[in-house]
Image: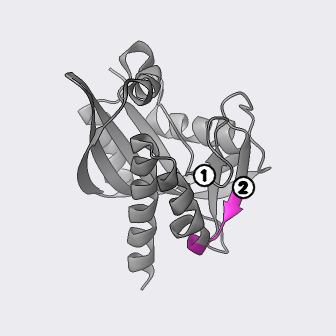
Amino acid sequence: MYVTAEIIREVEQRYGTPVEITRQYEMTPEQFDIVRLGQTQGRCHDVTLVIVDHERNIVVIRKPSYPLGAYRTPSGGVEIGEAFDNGAIREAKEETGLDIVLEKYLIRASARFHCGSEVIDWTTRVLQVRPTGGTLQPLDTKEIVEARKVTIAEITGPIREALLATGSPGLRYRAELDGLAIELMTNERQ
């Protein structure tokens, strides 16, 4: 088991109780295979990191398969036996080159991906984090081709449109998570 209920209780004690959402997506066999690739050793979760700097810019990444203009917040899996915080910090470093501090647990998303009679249930935990150092440059250049800072207007405007234009349910899911995270952070500041 990668992330147990006990681990999540501890995360909630440190970073707060998240908003919970549920989503369902129908996928083509090719799209479903992409989700299946993330299930190494039975993994069915990811930690998504909304890295917000002091100017309120947000760090996004682009994978090799994404069209130009399509970005999303970085994410990855906590490894078996790895502490939750350490997994999140490692993923941020690999995908963005940045060192981070976890600040707030924003969203627990339960997604069900369908392809015919096949189903994958996936949990995403979205956390707001702050960069503390490093250089904005992906270390895992096989998985990530670009990391950059964008404004809230960019991520909720042209970047969201680019993700949705792909027609990919997986990227629609990512656009929805990013949009909700920004909405939660923006409402909190008001």
Image quadrant containing the N terminus: top left
Question: Mark 2: which secondary structure?
Answer: strand
Q: Residue at x 56, y 65 (%)?
A: 155
Q: Measuring from the top left, give residue 72's x and y in whole percent.
A: 56, 51
Q: Residue at x 51, y 47 (%)?
A: 166
> Which of the two discs, 2 and 1, sits closer to the camera?
1
Q: Measuring from the top left, give residue 174's x and y in whole percent.
A: 45, 49
- The residue sitting at the top extreme is 41
Q: Please state if 115 lies on the left or on the right of 96 as rendered.
A: left
Look at the image and say whether residue 150 sits in the magenta stretch.
Answer: yes
Numbered circle sitting on residue 10: none
Numbered circle sitting on residue 148: 2
Look at the image and say whether residue 34 sits in the magenta stretch.
Answer: no
For disc 1, the neighbor class at 10 Å (few under 14, some 14 to 19, many from 20) is many
Q: Is residue 31 visible?
A: yes
Q: Residue at x 31, y 40 (%)?
A: 8
Q: Are marks 2 and 1 in contact (CB under 8 Å)?
A: yes
What range is drawn magenta here? 148-153
- Amino acid type, mark 1: Tyr
Q: Quadrant of residue 3?
A: top left
Label 1 sits on residue: 71
112 lies above or below 148: above
Foreground residue among 76 and 37: 37
- Amino acid type, mark 2: Arg
Foreground residue among 45 and 18: 45
For the image, the number of numbered tags is 2
